[in-house]
Image (cartoon, rainbow, N blue to C red):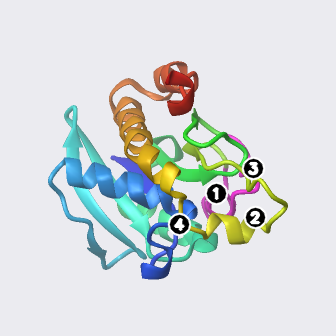
Amino acid sequence: MKLIVGLGNPGGAYLHSRHNIGFMVVKALAKAEGLALKKDNSASALSAKLKIDNQAVVLAIPLTFMNLSGIAVRQLAKKYKAGHQDILIVCDDLDLAFGKLKIRKEGSSGGQRGLESIIDFLGGKDFSRLRIGISRPQRSSDAAEYVLSAFTKQEREELKEIISKALDCCLSWVCSGIDESMNIFNQRSCREEK
């Protein structure tokens, strides 16, 4: 069983925030597959099951807040008997240029609190993660305030393409594996392609 988890914060106040780009990707993937994410009673998450290239996959978004994402991921991994190598976490990254994708098979949290929580609750760093660049604020504003703010009008116009590429990356991870996905997607940036 493969597990694709998008990180973010639940609730309408955070719906369109930069920190919720992981939610946006997983919701878009569910929509593309004609699925609704539903409350999972044995995990603190909304989830949906599907088959991709004859592989069983669970899409999920935690109902815990970002900093406690590890609770939901551990519950989901236990329920679906998913090993660390079967987990892909989709999240925002302040240190990547807006729209740039970076997928890795393991590593540190890089200061991303959701990843930090998952590392703590899983007891390891050996799970895949797809980071989507949201850039750092141009002025010296608080990073916490920035990630919880909404995308600008110009960024919103680019989001559809960014999310589409992130979906392609998720599908590649399921169908072709992490190494192939790293070869393809770590070279691309939506802005760089224009």
- Whether tag 3 and tag 1 are in contact, CB under 8 A, the answer is yes
Whole-number angstrom distance, CA of label 4 to CA of label 1: 18 Å
Task: Tell me the amino acid under the disc marked 1.
Answer: Leu
116 falls in the magenta region: yes
Instruction: Say which residue label 3 marks.
Output: 110
Tell which tag, 1 or 2, sits nearer the viewer: 2
- Mark 4 vs 1, N-terminal side: 4
Instruction: Say which residue label 4 marks.
Output: 17
* Dot 4 crowding, Cα within 10 Å, few <14, some 14–19, many 20+: some
Image side of residue 80 versus residue 91, left or right: left
Q: Is residue 181 above or below residue 128?
A: above
Tag shown at residue 143: 2
* Dot 1 crowding, Cα within 10 Å, few <14, some 14–19, many 20+: many
Task: Tell me the amino acid under the disc marked 4.
Answer: Ser
Q: Is residue 190 above or below residue 152?
A: above
Of helix, strand and loop, which one carries label 4? loop
Task: Tell me the amino acid under the disc marked 2.
Answer: Ala
* Dot 3 crowding, Cα within 10 Å, few <14, some 14–19, many 20+: few
Image location (x, y in percent) of residue 63? 44, 76
Whole-number angstrom distance, CA of label 3 to CA of label 1: 8 Å
- Residue shown at 45%/53% (left/top)? 156
5 or 122, nearer to the observer:
5
Residue stretch rendered in magenta on the structure: 107-124
- Mark 3 vs 2, N-terminal side: 3
Of helix, strand and loop, which one carries label 3? loop
1 or 151, nearer to the observer:
151
48 or 139, nearer to the observer:
139
Instruction: Say which residue label 1 marks.
Output: 115
